[in-house]
Amino acid sequence: MKTLRLRAGKERSLLRRHPWIFESAIERGGGDSGETVRVEGHDGQFLGWAAFSPSSKIRARVWSFDEAQRIDAAFFSRTIALALQARSRFDIQSDGMRLVHGESDGLPGLIVDRYGDTLVAQFTSAGVERWKAVIADALLAHTGLSQLYERSDASSRALEGLPEATGWLRGSGATDLVLREHGWQLALDIAHGHKTGFYLDQRDSRKRFADHAKRLQFQRVLNCFCYTGGFTVAALSGGAAHVTSIDSSGPAIAQAAANVALNGFAPERAHFMDADVNASLRQFAQAGKTFDAIVLDPPKYAPTVAHAERAARAYKDINRLAFKILEPGGVLFTYSCSGGISADLFHKIVASAGADAGVDGFITERMGGAPDHPMTISFPEGEYLKGLVVMRKP
Ligand code: SAH
């Protein structure tokens, strides 16, 4: 058994059950890509069993803190079964859900989403890459499904020294699917869509947006960074009179328009713009065009804390512009999915955007990722998605 000896004083985070071991914490030792190593403190004390990753800054990720645990097929089978068991206790009103959420489910680097009868997996660490076949078999065995598509094309693969890999891992079938979320239908493309095809993490926020549309009888809605139109369909289903949706991805816009039709909404109620959000917001502000509800769900501006400052400016900019074109009494659903921006910092950014726009508002709700994208108390990095619902003072 290969070992990894940590430098003196570097044991603390592992003792708190945090699963990452950075390159700088290691005194000596190692293994092959994805190989299980015994991690020990400076004094030789056992700390955990981890997967070694020779070219990543996160040099190893812990599978287990239990010395008696063997890292084998039975371990993966049991860990996956526990992740599925947790899902059965979460409130998920959809046939699309995240079954495995990486570190939070004890499987660092593994993402598995279920869309109806099809599973889509992303392997983004050397450890799960090495155990891919075992993991694939366990996923099918525990779900009783036969189709598993691989979307290992995330940029984080490169940090682990792994090449891209996409295609059917088990079984085969259609890659354009329709999922049922709340009461509506949403078509997606698991082969070409973003991530595994859809942003499941915003499920609860889409529901809240539909609820608001119904209660406040939105007339003019603006959905910025609409992707395939999840918030657009939510607003229309809540009875919003008209929704303008913006995204800079042509295929996403086409899918969004198709989703409006799929749910039987009249095309006149939806307008789509294949455009840059920042430029569009500026144009609306100049033209004096206003909305009574706005969604701002931008891509990840700050993957890590190192990008936070520049990202903060970008978030502030779009929020300031959105406040300027928000009607008094109107609501803004604003999000950051950046791990590098804390909930506290995001609140400050939105506050300073409001101050610059000369607008004050009530924070009526704080939002996070849907429960199938859980964070655990031992892994605070799991909190990436945060949102605020702000009602402009009437
Ligand atoms: N709200 C969506 C998810 C948004 S993901 C949902 O519920 O499904 C972020 C989206 O922003 C992506 O679709 C991406 O194409 C788009 N995007 C990124 N930069 C953009 C820009 N500058 N202008 C417009 N759209 C942009």
Image: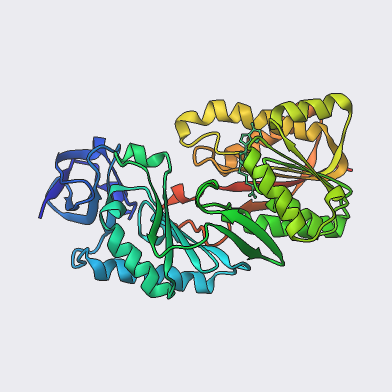
In which quadrant of the rendered image does the N terminus lie? bottom left
Whether residue 342 sits left or right of residue 139 in the image: it is right
Please state which of residues 270 and 262 is positioned toward the viewer in this rendering.
262
The image shows residue 303 at horizontal and vertical percentages of: 48, 37
Q: Nearer the viewer, residue 124 or 36?
A: 124
Quadrant that contains the C terminus? top right
Which of the 4 image quarters holds residue 294?
top right
**Where is residue 102 shown, x and y percent of the image?**
40, 55
x and y percentages locating residue 290 in the rendered image: 87, 36
In the rendered image, the vertical position of residue 241 relative to residue 96, given as above or below: above
The one nearer the camera, 82 or 379, is 82
Question: What colour scheme was applied to this rendering of the protein?
Answer: rainbow
Please state if 363 lies on the left or on the right of 375 as rendered.
Answer: right
Name which residue lies at 84% across and 59% down. 214
Image location of residue 58, percent across then percent down: 30, 41
Left or right of residue 39, residue 241 in this image = right
Q: Residue at x 51, y 74 (%)?
A: 88
Q: Is residue 12 visible?
A: yes
Quick check: 76 left or right of 356?
A: left
Q: Report the residue at 64% width, 32% height from top.
A: 315
* Residue 168 against residue 355 in the figure, above or below: below
